């Protein structure tokens, strides 16, 4: 019987080991399920975060493109304003030169209109006689 007891004890140990193995297997399955849930939750939150990051990048890129267009427009307007200012300065300089030329001309040369309007009767009569003589001479040349 000692042999029978030993066998039963060995059998009992084997049965206990089998039960423990089954319990270990169920625990491992449950642990794997938890691990799978943790990974799934992590993946879902990561997907949400990555989707938000992609949307933010798209918004940033579109804003940068819009800003670049506006900066180009501002540069174009600034360049046009600068060109207009240079052209205005050139025209003002040319006009100042013309005014200076006219002032110098009037300083050295006779102002006919002012001279006639403010001149004496003798100078007006002399100019009228010179004009009449020129007209008569011109008419006389035509008849011949």
Image: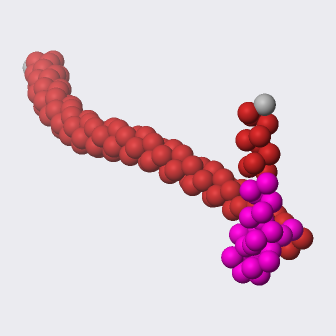
115 lies above or below 28? below
| Residue 20 appears in the figure | no
94 lies above or below 66? below
Is residue 49 toward the left or the right of residue 129 in the image?
Answer: left
Residue at screen point 80% across, 60% down: 130
The kind of secondary structure the magenta stretch mainly shows is helix
Query: Is residue 77 magenta-colored?
Result: no
62 lies above or below 23? below
- Front-most of 94 and 107? 107
Residue 128 on image: x %, y %: 74, 64
Residue 34 on image: x %, y %: 18, 38
- Front-most of 130 and 94? 130
| Residue 110 appears in the figure | yes
- Front-most of 86 and 123? 123
Residue 136 on image: x %, y %: 75, 48
- Front-most of 134 and 38? 134
Query: Is residue 113 magenta-colored?
Result: yes
- Res 91 quadrant in image: bottom right
Residue at screen point 76% across, 57% down: 131
Residue at screen point 66% across, 53% down: 87
- Res 21 quadrant in image: top left
Is residue 29 toward the left or the right of residue 133 in the image?
Answer: left
Residue 11 on image: x %, y %: 13, 20
Is residue 73 toward the left or the right of residue 17 in the image?
Answer: right
| Magenta stretch in the rendered image | 109-133
């Amino acid at each position: 019987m000692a042999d029978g007891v030993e066998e039963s004890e060995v059998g009992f140990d084997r049965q206990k080991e089998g039960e423990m193995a089954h319990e270990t297997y169920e625990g491992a399955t449950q642990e794997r399920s938890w691990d799978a849930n943790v990974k799934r939750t992590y993946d879902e939150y990561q997907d949400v975060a990555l989707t938000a990051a992609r949307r933010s990048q798209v918004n940033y890129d579109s804003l940068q493109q819009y800003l670049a267009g506006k900066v180009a427009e501002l540069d174009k307007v600034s360049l046009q304003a600068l060109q207009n200012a240079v052209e205005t300065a050139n025209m003002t300089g040319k006009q100042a030169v013309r005014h200076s030329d006219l002032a110098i001309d009037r300083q050295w040369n006779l102002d006919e209109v002012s001279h006639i309007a403010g001149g004496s009767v003798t100078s007006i009569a002399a100019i009228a006689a010179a004009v009449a003589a020129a007209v008569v001479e011109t008419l006389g040349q035509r008849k011949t």
